[in-house]
Image: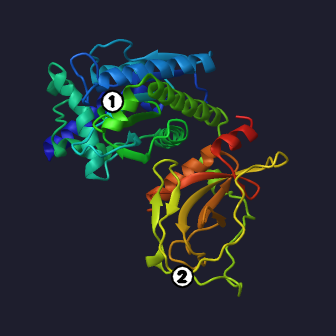
Amino acid sequence: MVTSVIMVLVLIMLLPRDAQARDKSGRITTIVIDAGHGGKDPGALGRNSREKDITLKVALKTGELIRKQHPDVKVVYTRTKDEFIELHRRAEIANRTKADLFISIHCNAHKSRTHYGAETFVMGLHRSQANLDVARFENAAILYEDDYKEKYEGFDPNSPESYIIFSMYQNIYREQSLLMASLVQNELGDKSKRFDRGVKEAGFLVLYRTTMPSVLVELGFISNSNEEEYLRSSQGQQQLAESLAAAFTSYRQHTEKNSKPREVISQARPNPTIINTTSADSPAMASPETLSVVRNTQTGSLDTQKTGQGKRQEPQSVKTKTSSSVTDVTWRVQILTSPKKLNQSHSKLKNMGNIFEYYHKGAWKYTTGAFSTEEEALVYRNQLKNQGFSDAFVVPFAGNERITPEEARKLQGK
């Protein structure tokens, strides 16, 4: 235990002195894009591809798109060819260039070849064995380095005890990192049609040593034959790059407005459509066992399986096409879908505020919160996920009409 504490203190002392003194103006001038693995470190292996090749191609395409869309932003790569770059050097590049954002690009793998989907990590303490397993694999890259025990002060990527150091880690850029991670996941779902595995936390050495908002993106599972085919295709790599570039654009717009998501969240619009708890015309409330919420793997939305219990009322569905005269866009967070209309006293809703209900595609759907920007809704979604709403996702409306994220962004001039 004494050894672990000493290791913690040494690693903290090794962090750059400007970790607490970075410019807080919010202006984005430099981004570092890190293509995971490389050279003698192939990363995860698929049947027909290597992680290091995919990450490099996606990284270069992403940087090219950002340069075209943001000519005033400096794009820095940790590598531009198939070469081995030590983990600490990747972080040093970001710190030395005083980057405003660090994106590390990777591909996932699992012994079960059925796993699929994209997930984005921020620096933090792992909350599940699965998160720890991902961190262990990525941190194992240091085993390719000479004298890694000296460079990383005895850190062993395969030892659970080594990860104790992250419990003392205080990330002053956690909120910005979570925002970027949420935007990445949102875009990977919309543009690349990747299944959303969520925003997660774990102890990654490459993020631990950076002194700016940082995320590590797992684009998909190279161990899944279908997903591997997508990851290694030029079309798939272009879509993934477009997703990351779009996430950066949204992040920059939000950051440079110097907004404060936590304060905005408490200012949700006061007049959403509230569930009527007293109407005599309301159908009977569904019992908890009748709820069967599943995620649609094609759209990322929540839908319900048919329960076959009773006859359901068929009220007027929420329209999904936007009238050209409607420009008032509201972003909400959907938390529940039910085959029957629910009362606000239902266990899943009674402690939530600003509940908005709508009928869509044969099911009652429930949202909470009402925000004027997508970024604010994404931050709120993350808070709800931490509260146990693991499948919460953002849904935009024009008035009371549900629209697609693309339509909403267009209406808002993005």
Question: Within 10 Å of the Cα at label 1, are there few (<14), some (14-19), or many (20+) other Cα atoms?
Answer: many
Residue 97 seen by the camera? no
- Amino acid on which the number 2 mark rests in the picture: Gly
Q: Secondary structure at mark 1?
A: helix
Which residue lies most toward the bottom here? Answer: 280
Q: Secondary structure at mark 2?
A: loop
Q: Nearer the viewer, residue 402 or 128?
A: 402
Query: Number of marks in the image?
Result: 2
Location of mark 2 (residue): 310
Colour scheme in the image? rainbow
**Residue at 33%, 25% in the rendered image:** 36
Quarter of the image containing the C terminus?
top right
The residue beneath circle 1 is 206
Name the kind of residue labelled 1 in the image.
Val
Cβ–Cβ below 8 Å for labels 2 and 1? Answer: no
Q: Is residue 326 left or right of residue 268?
A: right
390 over 238 or under it: above or below: below
Mark 2 or 1, closer to the camera: 2
Q: Residue furthest right?
A: 325
First in sequence: mark 2 vs mark 1: 1
Observer-nearest of 258 and 140 = 140
Tell which of 79 and 403 is nearer to you.
403
Residue 61 in the image, given as x and y percentages of width and height? 48, 19
Query: For mark 2, does the 10 Å Cα neighbourhood hold few (<14), some (14 to 19), or many (20 or more) residues?
Result: few
Position of 121 with respect to 222 (left or right) is right
**x%, y% of residue 29?**
57, 21
Marks 2/1: CA–CA distance: 54 Å
Relative to residue 130, is residue 250 drawn left or right? right
Among the 4 quarters of the image, the one containing residue 139? top left
